[in-house]
Amino acid sequence: MDMKKRMRKRENKMAKFVACAAALCILFFTQAAAGRGQQSAGPMPAAAPPLKISSGDLIEVTMFENPDLSGRFRVDEKGEVTVPLIGRVHVEGATAEEVATTIEKRFVEAQILQPAESHATVFIAEYATQGITVNGEVKTPGVYPALGVRMLNDVIASAGGVTQLAASKVVITHRSDPGNQVTVEYNPEALKPVIPDAQIFPGDSILIPRAGIVYVLGDVNHAGGYVLDGRNSLTVEEAMALAGGSAHAAALKRVQLVRTLEGGRREAITVPVNLIYKGKAPDVALKDGDILYVPTSNSRLVAEQAINSALGIGTSVAIYKTSYGQ
């Protein structure tokens, strides 16, 4: 009798174990299916547009089970290649897939291969005449070779990277759609680097615009140029804060704002920074190219000194790039 009770207890335990295991399996597969559903609901990356063949490109034609008919062919100035037994084939302006279809048909029309045997693949080995143009605020602007699709960050790195005056955006012009420029955020030096997975194709152009810049010079703790990255303007109070504030002997009531007018003429405007700090005078918005000159308390001819300081700005002035909104 005791033996039967023990057997029943074991059977009950086994049944509970199997039931728990089954429940866990159902829960696991339910969550996995939900995860797949969530992933599939997300935005899918846009398909890359097919690349067109141009004169000077090198294409590789492979005929399945017919190596004697395969080979590499350079596209001539007429946009044609010469394929064994079928002669000249016009390929310029077509994609690799379209050229493969044309070659298959030509072998069948010439009665060299049967339809069931004519299978071609075409690979664009070199884009000799379709380099990628990189202009703007990069260290080495120019045209860079593209042997296929490249990533935006790699192309900019090939151009030496961006300069200190570069804005945090890049303008891309695709050769296949020149009328529709694409602007993407790009700031690899931010605390949270912004490096988009943008594809660059042969013949594309990349422009890195110049960001605005204002200069804070004179009796401040960190004199230099401050890049207006991510904003159109900067106020006097904000610029003074970026420059670490004024030094001990600064004459804040006689700060000079040097602004370039039309025709290249410069004028100096007195800005009472001491009153701005106290909220008794309106803060002044600085524009691209403005120079804020903070004189010392014993300076004379302040406006003239400010303009002379502006004229002397050169490569020795430190440039500070602050990423706003990052």
Image: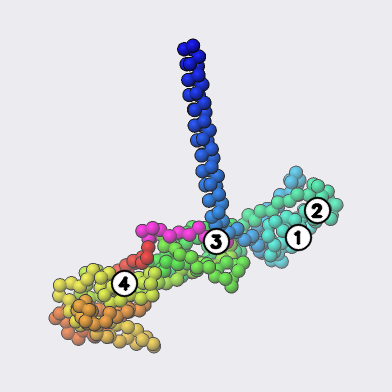
Label 1: element kind = strand
Pointer 2: what residue? 107
Mark 2 element type: helix
Separation of residues labelled 2 and 3 (CA atoms)? 35 Å
Look at mark 1 in the image and give the residue it sits on: 89
The residue located at (45%, 64%) in the rendering is: 185
Marks 2 and 4: which is nearer the front? 4
Q: Earlier in the sequence, mark 2 or mark 4?
A: 2
Residue 43: % across, % down:
55, 57
Residue shown at the point (34%, 84%) measured from the top left: 260
Rate crowding at label 1 as few (under 14), some (14 to 19) or many (20 or more) other CA atoms within 10 Å.
some
- Confirm or deny contact between disc 1 and disc 4 (CB under 8 A): no
Residue 143 relative to residue 225: left or right:
right
> Which label belongs to residue 225?
4
In the picture, which quadrant includes the C terminus?
bottom left
- Disc 2 crowd rating (10 Å Cα; few below 14, some 14-19, many 20+) is many
Q: Mark 3 points at which residue?
A: 200
Q: Could you say whether the residue bearing mark 4 is in a helix, strand or loop?
A: strand
**Label 4 crowd (10 A; few <14 / some 14-19 / many >=20):** many
The residues tagged by marks 2 and 4 sit, at their Cα atoms, a distance apart of 67 Å
Q: Where is residue 27 in the image (x, y as percent from the top left)?
A: 51, 39
User: Amino acid type of disc 3?
Assistant: Ile
Is the magenta region chiefly helix, strand or loop? loop
